[in-house]
Amino acid sequence: MSLHLYLVPAGALDGIREGDVVVLDGPEGRHAATVKRTQPGERLRLADGAGRVVTGEVVSVEKDRLSLRAETVEDQPESSPRFVLVQALAKGDRDDQAIEAATELGVDEVVPWQAGRSIVQWRGERGEKARGKWDAVLVAATKQSRRARRPALAQTATTADLVRRIEAGATAYVLHEDATEPLAALAAEQLPADGDVLVIVGPEGGVAPEELEALRAAGGRVVRLGDTVLRSSSAGPAALAVLCAASRWR
């Protein structure tokens, strides 16, 4: 069984070397010591969410913190190409489900998309609360999947923002049920070696025709996954699995 992984604040592992004692405190330390009842002698991993991972043995446990001695210190590089899920805002918890599964599959960045047909609107205090929920989902899924790097959470994007990103050089695959070009074939033959690869998923009502045309005109490829229609919660993760199978999982 893989070791438990806990996320520490950015920079907390800077300068750590093998043999150093590292303190895990705050909410994560409290969870490890009180909820998980971690005992001295157990081994676990600490990650800063930016690629640095310390594996070590717990040497002491207090009420809301623990200390471990670093056995190994690793710096895992960022993946290339970077997989970016552009997830249209959806009602209920479907977008939460999508970004959770995408994190488990190794997505590098998540972009909330305020699509034309999105029923949900991220504005003001409500928008900040929703964004905080997405961030919490990404953190929890990062720990569950034992990732050294957590996905970046981008600012909420409009269709114009996506167009600019594609025109700047990002590869983009727009999922659409009426498309004829299969993503699996493109991923196997034309997946770039570096840069950003965007997987764009529309809301429940689909991508509006004018948005689809704008994304296509900017250079986006309109693709399908298969013969069935997937929900907004499953389309993105399914597409990421196709991309991973063509690259990272070989």
Image (tube, grey):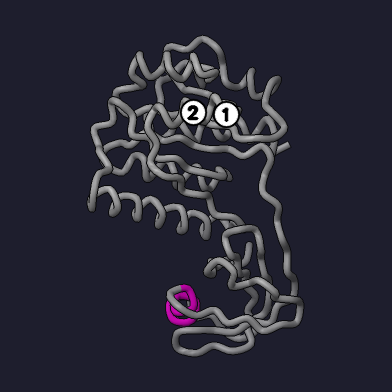
Q: Observer-nearest residue: 221 or 233?
A: 221
Which corner quadrant holds the C terminus? Answer: top right
Q: How many marks?
A: 2
* Label 1 with label 2: CB-CB less than 8 Å: yes
Q: Tag on residue 164?
A: 2
Q: Observer-nearest residue: 139 or 97?
A: 139
For marks 1 and 2, give the CA distance: 6 Å
Which amino acid type is marked by label 2? Arg
Task: Examine the residues drawn in magenta and state their main secondary structure.
Answer: helix
* Residues shaded magenta: 28-35
Q: Is residue 177 visible?
A: no
Q: Residue at x 44, y 81 (%)?
A: 34
Q: Observer-nearest residue: 236 or 116?
A: 116
Q: Tag on residue 38?
A: none
**Lateral position of residue 37 relative to residue 202, left or right:** right
Q: Residue at x 43, y 11 (%)?
A: 178
Q: Residue at x 68, y 76 (%)?
A: 56
The secondary element bearing badge 2 is classed as helix
Relative image position of residue 171 (x, y in whole percent) = 59, 26
Q: Is residue 49 visible?
A: yes
Relative image position of residue 206 (x, y in whole percent) = 34, 22
Q: Quadrant of residue 193?
A: top right
Q: Is residue 73 magenta?
A: no
Q: Residue at x 64, y 87 (%)?
A: 59
Relative image position of residue 14 (x, y in whole percent) = 66, 71
Mark 1 lies on residue: 168
Which amino acid type is marked by label 1? Ala
Q: Vertically, is 53 above or below 119?
A: below
